[in-house]
Image: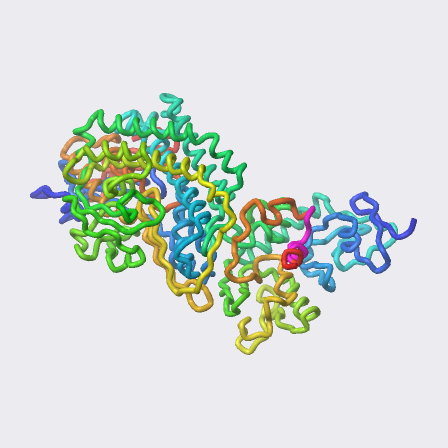
């Protein structure tokens, strides 16, 4: 039979043009990821979905599946590397899970649990970033932004607004808002935008609603991310 | 060298010529929450000249919550403490209710919050009495240091220790059912709560509550017995006479969650009553002293010298006209009969008052568990946003004040927290001075004498940080220095409690 490959020894079917990630998601196999959302063009920036495909290290979200390919995903080595990436993400921003309203429904936290990260290892940068609460309905907490560019893509490709972009280079890279003041209130952003509900972490959130869902009933309280998948998918369902 | 010994404990705050005195530091204090130390300055004849309780840590919550969204406050500030996070959570919850313009919660929301609060008072009081203080009270202030701890209690009185542990466990389970976690959960949201109880959660708590009430009665009888056994001595130990402040219900009943401020003077007359706590800053001022990170609050109308007061169980049981649960009310009447014409001022009576409250909380929990509102679905109210919110609650250790202002975007622009222990700062210092002046009168200094100082502080159940648990295993170094700084004696307690010279 054509159009199938092996993912950690399991036979996975795929259609022409599908990436390793597409085929894995369709087969219900979890490959850790943060910047990927099947609704948007793959970006390949967070590198968390890195797998070994026929001995080459590639991003599963951007690499097309091919016939007979041998892919390694949940190996000890790859999980260790992913944990390292996650630890770096945690110290670059201010990710204070104990007080964060997104805790329990945060993809960064859930992936970190999945990969066995139980504590930060590196020295925290503690960057000083102000919260943008200028918008009447939504808030942006830049402390928690992981630069996945999902809001950038959603605003550009789905909302046709270009509200967000990434500005600066290297460690200076940061999320910028396209308005004269640089404030969200002065942009064309609205709470009904697609960009308002794709954030995998607690950076873009509705105002006044934190902690409404009790502990025990939050998305990842119920089942691990490897079973329930991305938070954005569930956010869409909740909004409907 | 020192011509005259101070005659009043007020004079022991600052010695005239400290550079000529020997210094003893009790650092850190043990079996209290958080980090503090006591310094004693003695003259050549081992007579006390100066005694101070210092709080040596600085938390800075008021500063670093600035710029954060107001709805985060209950979850953020509860991290002040690992023992009484619920108090901070609910005081902030009451403050943000006001920020969103809600003055009256739904019956379900208020009862869920009250249940959580009674659960926490019960666990905190059990922790303090059994784990932290009972070794002093049962074995004696001068008893073997190796025995004077929770492990000693378990060895000598296993049933009692077990009751203490299980009482605390029940309180923690009440918190878990209402907040999702035993420590640092979520419950209060602006204008309400995020969950009520379901019937299985209620049944789970109900199956144990009779036993808890019964153990609460035993704990109260024990605290009473320990006080009455050496009545004269216990009444005088670390005794100071102060005004007392707490919340009370409109009809004068004991109130722990919501009420008006009442202050009763030393002689029993009311200085304040039915005062809306949102005007606290019209009545309470804070004095700063260079030698402590903790401020010294006082009543503005009486000034810093005459206006200090006490808060916590002793103040609450003294202040209220009655308690609205039968077993605790019976105990209150007996307690107040210690002094029929005024307030019970004995510092060690804090323990007795605390156990009256523990029993009251157990009774209240039992009442609430039979209330169908606890299983309701109407969880949240809404209103018009306001700029300032003030929440006050009776935490285990006393009146707790949270005061926040927000900007037009909903971010915190100013915060003022007056934590329960802060109100007792001056009183604890004076109790330390009382003990020091009674004990340090020329005799050789022993570890037991230093423990007397700690016993006085422990009676107040201070929460000095409030996040660290120093359960008697903290190392301790006591140095005796000559006026020129030369060390003449050095007593070291290691992490195992072993003493070395």
- In the foreground, A179 or A61: A179
- The secondary structure that dominates the magenta segment is helix
Q: In this orientation, does residue B385 appear? A: yes
Looking at the image, residue B243 sits to the left or right of residue B160; the answer is left
Q: Quadrant of the N terminus of chain B?
A: top left
Instruction: Point out the stretch of residues depicted in magenta.
Output: A227-235
Residue B231 picture location, percent across and down: 19, 28
- The residue at the far left in this view is B3
Residue A210 picture location, percent across and down: 52, 56
Looking at the image, residue B321 sits to the left or right of residue B31; the answer is left
Looking at the image, residue B474 sits to the left or right of residue A126; the answer is left
Q: In this orientation, does residue B26 appear? A: no
- In the foreground, B293 or B94: B94
**In percent of the image, x 42 and y 67: which residue is there?**
B407
Residue B215 picture location, percent across and down: 38, 28
- In the foreground, A26 or B432: A26
Total marks in image: 0
Residue B131 picture location, percent across and down: 37, 32
Q: Is residue B299 magenta?
A: no
């Amino acid at each position: 039979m054509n159009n199938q490959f092996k993912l950690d020894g399991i036979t996975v079917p795929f259609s022409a043009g599908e990436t390793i990630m597409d085929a894995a998601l369709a087969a219900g196999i979890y490959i850790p990821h943060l910047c990927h959302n099947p609704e948007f063009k793959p970006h390949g920036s967070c590198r968390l979905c890195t797998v070994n495909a026929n001995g080459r290290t590639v991003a599963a979200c951007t690499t097309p599946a091919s016939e007979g390919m041998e892919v390694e995903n949940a190996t000890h080595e790859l999980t260790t590397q992913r944990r390292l990436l996650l630890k770096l993400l945690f110290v670059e921003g201010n990710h204070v899970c104990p007080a964060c309203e997104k805790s329990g429904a945060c993809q960064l936290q859930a992936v970190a649990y999945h990969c066995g990260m139980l504590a930060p290892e590196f020295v925290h940068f503690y960057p000083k970033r102000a919260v943008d609460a200028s918008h009447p309905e939504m808030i942006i907490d830049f402390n928690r932004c992981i630069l996945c560019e999902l809001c950038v893509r959603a605003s550009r490709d789905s909302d046709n607004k270009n509200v967000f972009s990434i500005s600066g280079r290297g460690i200076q890279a940061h999320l910028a808002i396209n308005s004269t003041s640089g404030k969200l209130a002065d942009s064309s952003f609205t709470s009904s935008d697609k960009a308002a509900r794709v954030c995998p972490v607690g950076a873009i959130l509705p105002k006044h609603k934190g902690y409404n869902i009790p502990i025990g009933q939050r998305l990842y309280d119920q089942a691990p991310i490897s079973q329930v998948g991305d938070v954005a998918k569930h956010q869409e369902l909740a909004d409907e | 060298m020192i011509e005259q010994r101070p005659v009043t404990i007020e004079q022991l705050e600052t010695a005239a010529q400290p550079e000529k005195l020997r210094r003893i530091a009790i650092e850190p204090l043990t079996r209290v929450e958080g980090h503090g130390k006591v310094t004693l300055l003695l003259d050549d004849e081992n007579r006390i000249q100066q005694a101070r309780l210092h709080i040596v840590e600085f938390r800075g919550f008021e500063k670093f919550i600035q710029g954060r969204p107001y709805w985060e406050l209950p979850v953020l500030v509860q991290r002040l403490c690992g023992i009484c996070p619920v108090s901070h959570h609910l005081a902030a919850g009451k403050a943000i209710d006001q920020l969103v313009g809600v003055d009256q919660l739904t019956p379900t929301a208020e009862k869920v919050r009250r249940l959580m609060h009674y659960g926490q008072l019960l666990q905190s009081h059990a922790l303090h009495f059994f784990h932290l203080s009972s070794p002093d009270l049962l074995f004696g202030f001068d008893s073997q240091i190796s025995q004077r701890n929770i492990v000693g209690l378990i060895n000598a009185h296993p049933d009692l220790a077990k009751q203490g542990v299980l009482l605390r466990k029940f309180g923690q389970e009440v918190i878990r059912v209402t907040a999702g976690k035993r420590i640092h959960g979520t419950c209060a949201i602006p204008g309400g709560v995020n969950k009520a109880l379901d019937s299985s959660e209620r049944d789970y708590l109900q199956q144990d509550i009779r036993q808890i009430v019964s153990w609460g009665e035993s704990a109260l009888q024990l605290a009473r017995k320990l006080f009455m056994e050496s009545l004269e001595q216990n009444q005088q130990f670390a005794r100071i006479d102060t005004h007392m402040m707490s919340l009370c219900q409109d009809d004068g009943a004991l109130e722990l969650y919501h009420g008006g401020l009442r202050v009763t003077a030393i002689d029993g007359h009311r200085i304040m009553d039915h005062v809306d706590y949102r005007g606290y800053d019209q009545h309470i001022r804070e004095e700063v002293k260079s030698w402590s990170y903790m401020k010294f609050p006082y009543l503005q109308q009486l000034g810093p010298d005459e206006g200090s007061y006490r808060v916590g169980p002793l103040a609450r049981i003294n202040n209220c006209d009655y308690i609205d649960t039968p077993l605790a009310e019976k105990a209150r009447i007996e307690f107040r009969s210690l002094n029929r014409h005024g307030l019970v001022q004995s510092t060690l009576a804090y323990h007795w008052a605390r156990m009256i409250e523990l029993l009251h909380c157990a009774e209240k929990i039992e009442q609430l568990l039979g209330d169908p509102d606890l299983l309701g679905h109407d969880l949240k109210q809404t209103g018009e946003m306001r700029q300032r919110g003030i929440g006050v609650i009776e935490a285990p250790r006393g009146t707790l004040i949270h005061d926040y202002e927000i900007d037009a975007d909903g971010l915190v622009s100013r915060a003022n927290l007056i934590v329960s222990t802060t109100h007792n700062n001056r009183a604890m210092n004076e109790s330390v001075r009382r003990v020091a002046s009674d004990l340090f009168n020329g005799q050789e200094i022993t570890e037991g004498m230093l423990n007397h100082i700690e016993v006085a502080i422990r009676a107040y159940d201070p929460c000095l940080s409030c996040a660290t648990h120093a359960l008697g295993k903290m190392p301790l170094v006591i140095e005796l220095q000559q006026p020129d700084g030369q060390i003449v004696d050095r007593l070291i307690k290691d992490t195992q409690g072993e003493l070395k010279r």
